Each structure stands twice: as C-alpha cells, then as structure tokens.
Image: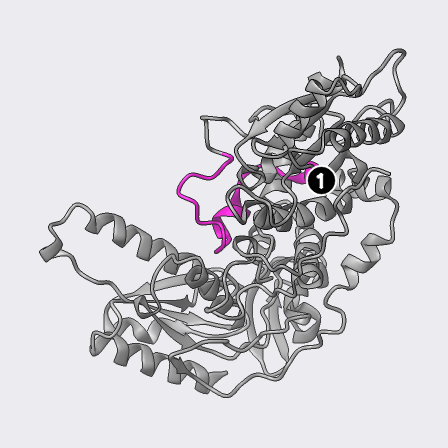
Amino acid sequence: MTENQPVEGWRPRIVAIVCNWCTYAGADLAGISRIQYPPNVRIIRVPCTGRINPFFIVKALQEGADGVLVSGCHPGECHYLTGNLSAKRKFAMLKRFLSYIGVEGDRTMFTWVSASEGERFAQVIKAVTAAVTALGPAGKLVKKWQLLR
Amino acid sequence: MENVETKLREEAKKLLAEKKADIIVGYEKGTLPLLAPPCFITDPEDAEKLVWNAFCVQNLAKFVHDLLSQHRESQKRLKPADRTKKTVGVVARGCTTRSLVIHLQEKQYNRDDIVILGVPCTGYVDRKKMDALIAGEEILEASVAGDSVLVKTAAGERKIPLKEALADNCLACRFNNPLISDLMTGDHAPAMDVTQEYARVDEFEKLSPDERWNYFTREMDKCVRCYACRNACPSCYCKVCFVEQSQPRWVGIGEDRSDTQVFQLMRLFHMAGRCVDCGSCIAVCPMGVDLRRFLKKLDKDALELFEHRAGISPDEPAMLGAFKESDKEDFIFTPK
C-alpha cells in the first residue's frame, strides 16, 4: 500500500481538541510566554472534554488528520466538576477500540494540561508531533479524496 | 421445553384477561423453517399462538422499547386526564432481560410499564451455521427433538445435534436465565461453557495492527449499509440515528469505503458497555459481517477497565454515564 510512505516535505496535520478552561488557557499562556512549539497543530476549543463526542475524534481521522490530541483539565480540576472524569472513560474505551481494529495507538492521544502549564503544553505538542511524524501520513479510516491530496 | 410453552401460554392468557398487560410480545410459529418470528398478542384467545423453542432468535426488548415510546408519543397529544398507561408483557430469556435492564438504567421507561415473562434458554439455532451443516440444501421443515434438530430437505431427513447448530453467542452465554422477571416459567436452564467467552478476542489481539486492520476492512467491505443490525439491536433506539442525521451529516452516503468503516466503527462503539451479546445483529446481517469479534472486545474492555457487565443490575448507572475515582489513567499521555 502506498499510504505509509512519507511524501517529500510532508508535515503532519494534528487536530487538538482542547477544553476552554484549562488547556486552551494553557496554550494561551504558552503563546504569551513566547514558548516555541511545532506549528502542525490545529486547535479546536470546546467547553469541556466531556463535550467531546468520540465521533469528533473518529471524524477528524476520517477527514484527514494524521493525529488527534485531546486535552483537558487534570482530574479533579474540571470547571464543571466531573466532565473530564466521565470523558476519561469514553476515551479509554475509544483508544483501546481504535487500536484493536488496527489504527495505530499514537494517532489518538489524551492528556491533561492545566491553565498554568504553558511549558507542559509546548512539551505535549512537541512530543505528539514527533510521535505522529514517526508514524507517517494516516492511511486508515481516511476518506479517499483526502488520500489523494 | 413443551411444559415451558404450555405454562407460557397460560400465563400470557391470564395476564391479558386480567388486564395486567395490554399487549404481549412473544414468538409465534412462522411460515419459514428455523425461524420463529416475533408476534404481538392483545386478545387472550391468541395466547395459544405463543411458542418457545430453539428457533426464537430475535431479542424482543427492541419491540418493548418501540411499543412504549410510540405509546408515549401518542399520549402527548391528549389532555392529561385522557392519558392512559400501557403495560407491555414480554417473553424474555437472559439476554432479553439484560436489554430491558439497560433500558431501565437509561430511564427509557419504568419498571411497572413492563411485565417480564421469564423463560429459561438453552440457546438458539444459528441459521448460517445450519446452512453450512447441511451444505446448501434447501430446508423444508425443521423441528427440535431433545438434543437434536430434525431437518427435512429434498434429499431426506437429517438429525443434527443441537450443540453444533447453536449460535456462537449462545455457546458462550453467561446469563442464559432471566436476571429479572415477574413470572418465571420453567426451571432454570443449565449454565453454558463460559471459558471460551473471549477466546476470539484474545486470538485477534495477538495479530499485528496491519493484520487486524486488513481483517477489519475485509469485514466492513461486506457491509451493504442496510442498517438491519441497527434496526434489530435493542440498544439502538435513538429517534434519529447518526447515520441518517443531516445536520451535521456525520457519515457520508457515497461509495467511499471509509464511510462504511466509520459507520460500523461508531455503531459498534455505541455498544460500549451496552451490548448484551444477544446476537440479533449477527442473525439479521445479510452479508455475514463478523460483528461479534468487535462487540466482544468492547465487552472485554468494559470488564477489564471498569468491572462493568452490560445490563446486570437496574440500580447501577450506565457505564459511560458514570465514573469512579479509581478509573485507570494509564492511557493518558505524559511528555518526557
């Protein structure tokens, strides 16, 4: 199959779905503090990780994202008290299920970044970008026209 | 089995005559061999139609939900004083009661809206297995006699051991007796062999990711998107299913393979902590997609991660609607 051969000059496209109260503010802090991190990530802000339908993640992969990062408040620090705790269950199941059907585990990442952790946000993005770059372009579950791009 | 059937008819007749149930959902003798279709009985005299044997395949909880939600919708147009209550009686084996428990956990209706006629279950005959056993001959008639199935084909009569023809999910069934019931007909059925419950999942996990992906794509390429699996599944009761939603349109309807894969993936994932392994989706699938291999994985994960088995206790909350402080966090990514 042609799907896992990196094209010349290929850079990963990573979708980061982050919560408004912690990780988005953490990303903001990283920006304000002028911390450098790879530009491959597209941030989508949602009210809470509990808002994230697992379908968002699958849909992002289908529409051509090479990796999906989900990040929210640390357990116990959720703005809505328990949103991230019930989200955690969904993600644990989804991550296992995706790797069961053969989608590489590193394509979907879940982490916690609080509003004061600008440094950690940059580290996460660096690490995720490196992991996804190592995997190469996504070829599984992807729409045909996305593969042709 | 015969006395279960007689008892079942008696009880159903009594329930309808005493107006304890407005309608009974059960199985009747169909026109095709090897298949006892669902039937809906409102007249006490019709209770004689009820059957209970190894050809009763479909999970009837689906129809209980349909009947009750339709009734609730119809009541919305009436003045509060004119509203009536509808009680649905259902012939339920182990997996059917588990589906009912899931509906109760998810607050779909109240416990007093249903009357459960529990029946012991020793498994049902898998049509596809049977076709393979008799090597493609047309089955004209079939009946169960003790531990074997008598099958009449154009070439003559054959006796097939019931054990060989039982569906996979029945062979590894953990809950073949009703978990909750108002009336129990017959004695409890003997337990099945559960040691091999996750055998196919364990075997699949050992393969490499690419092998697993190839298997997944090969299975999903068979799918013709008839949605029979969704229509048969008692846990699939959304008023508007995501495959038919158009704002936003979640799943494309073109010939793109990934759309079918995503449809199947998400329908399977919706079964996380909700699949009771009744095998209805597999029984109705016209293309023979191996859904059970994936559904069992979700079941296994739910047990491993959250010690949750679908539809065991009505008091427990739904798995993905709850959490514990002790939930594992080993999948959370930490940069070094």
Front residue of A36/B103: it is A36
- Residue B151 sits in which quadrant? bottom right
Q: Position of residue A43 (x, y in %)?
A: 65, 23
Q: Which residues are magenta?
A: B219-243
Q: Which residue is mark 1?
A: A110
Above or below, A118 against B336 in this view is above
Q: Position of residue B297 (x, y in %)?
A: 71, 55
Q: Position of residue A34 (x, y in %)?
A: 75, 17
Front residue of B34/B255: it is B255
- Residue A84 sits in which quadrant? top right
Instruction: Identify the residue at image location x=66%, y=50%.
Output: B291
Which amino acid type is shown beneath numbered disc 1? Phe
**Protein image colouring:** one colour
In the rendered view of the protein, which quadrant contains the C terminus of chain B?
top right
Instruction: Identify the residue at image location x=26%, y=81%.
Output: B14
Quick check: is B125 in the magenta stretch? no
Kindly identify which chain the residue marked by label 1 belongs to: A
Report if residue A98 is visible in the image.
yes
Q: Position of residue B209 (x, y in %)?
A: 84, 42
User: Quick check: B56 left or right of B196?
Assistant: left
User: Quick check: B251 left or right of B135?
Assistant: left
Report if residue B260 is visible in the image.
no
Instruction: Identify the residue at image location x=44%, y=57%.
Output: B106
Front residue of B202/A132: it is A132
Above or below, B196 against B208 in this view is below
* Category of crowding for the residue at label 1, using alpha-carbon neighbours closer than 10 angstroms: few (below 14), some (14–19), many (at least 20): many
Q: How many marks?
A: 1
